[in-house]
Amino acid sequence: MIVSLAELLVISLVVDWAFRKMNIPGLVGLLLVGVLFGPYALALVSPELLNISADFRLIALIVILLRAGLELSKDTLNRVGGRVVLLSAVPAITEGAAITVLGPPLLGISYLESAILGSIIAAVSPAVVVPLMIRFMERGMGAVKGIPTMILAAASIDDVFVIVIYSVLIGIYTGSTANIAWQLAGIPISIVLGIAVGLIVGVFLFRLFQHFDPRATKRVLVILGLSVLLVRAEHLMESWLPFASLLAVMAVGFIILEKDEHMAHEISAKLGKIWVFAEIVLFTMVGAQVNLTVALEAGFAGAVVIALGLVARSIGTYGCLLGSDLTVSERVFVVISYIPKATVQAAIGGAPLAAMVLLGMDKGPGEIILAVAVLSIVLTAPLGAWAISVSGERILTIAPPDVHDARDAVLESEGNKEIL
């Protein structure tokens, strides 16, 4: 396993460098390396590494979300908070509704099966979106209007919302006796509880670090360890209390930033070094989950469903931004940022098929759902990552050191018109 991981690291670093030289995001190359070396293509990755890939992906995702929290300023969140709420639900609803309507005529599955497919496809991938937003935030791009912060926060909550909807629909389909009303109520409960627990843990860690003053490396190890335990706690409580552990992880970073900016930057810098390794593991392992044969089975009809679903999603996303101070091009950037699919689709794309086989149901619809889910990763993850990087460089402006003074000065000089 170690040899396989070493080979993957060396090849990924070379591919990442080559793609960046071609002005293509390195993560696109990493995804392609994972697909090519995965079990469904050349099968060069050892089975032992694939068996623990879920744990690797989780740790990488925790690193991303911790860095995200450490970049979320309270002032920026106050300015974009309302838009975050809209963007965390409306785009997913419009896309899921479109796929529900399109599924029966194009894929030959029932409306309920189409709704299940829609709930899987409707999730944006924080694994793709969040790292790109952090890079923009580190360079101060889009900071005046808090655009990357808004997208980062909304994309993280979007997954919580979509997964709960999926749980409700698959429960109905398989005849589960689960309380649907309680599951739906679980959406706000899990979000609020996740944030609250994260804030409490963050305050505890801050005081602990203040008292003992450990080195930044030890602080990072403690935070990572507690973050893994938070995720574990979610799994232990999921049957009786909904809890969004990944939002809790973000909240830990957020509260440390609010309490001590210097400490937050030290921790973020250490996590940035870990991310060099974590990024490779995350995207290659996500790519390794992609079965190209299954994706091709979705065919042209599957591609049409995905494309039209994205059109509906884009309309919903753009609608959420009406009345904001974003320019048309900035709104288009937000729409583009909501394209990539990967994390949720790879995680639960095959779950409906597994449930149908377990219950002795017709597995045909499950195979179609899996095929379209995999195809959505193939079509949107590399393209979305590239489009976000390119459009961000062209659209987002770099803010001066004091973004609030800069924003006020621009608004005065432009007579409160939109910033171009």
Image: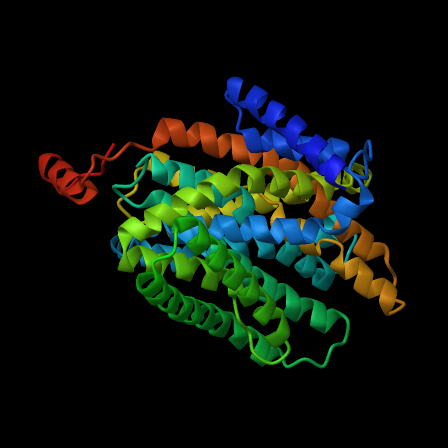
Placement of 76 over or under 208, stated as above or below: above
Q: Give the residue at x 46% y 31%.
A: 389
Decide which of 2, 288 is in the foreground and name it: 2
* Position of residue 163 measured from the top left corner of the image (x, y, whole percent): 60, 62
Farthest right residue?
A: 360
* Position of residue 384 measured from the top left corner of the image (x, y, whole percent): 54, 36
Decide which of 62, 220 is in the foreground and name it: 220
Q: Give the residue at x 40% y 42%.
A: 269
* Position of residue 307 measured from the top left corner of the image (x, y, whole percent): 61, 40
Total numbered badges shown on the rendered structure: 0
From the viewer's perspective, tell me whether residue 120 is left or right of residue 418.
right
From the viewer's perspective, tell me whether residue 143 is left or right of residue 172.
left
Decide which of 237, 362 is in the foreground and name it: 237
From the viewer's perspective, tell me whether residue 161 is left or right of residue 282.
left
Placement of 261 over or under 272, stated as above or below: below
**Coloring basis for residues:** rainbow
**Residue 119 in which image quadrant:** bottom right
Is residue 323 visible in this depiction of the protein? Answer: no
* Position of residue 301 measured from the top left corner of the image (x, y, whole percent): 74, 41
For the N terminus, give its image quadrant.
top right
From the viewer's perspective, tell me whether residue 45 is left or right of residue 251.
right
Q: Give the residue at x 58% y 52%.
A: 59
Decide which of 174, 399 is in the foreground and name it: 399
Is residue 72 visible in this depiction of the protein? Answer: yes
For the C terminus, give its image quadrant.
top left
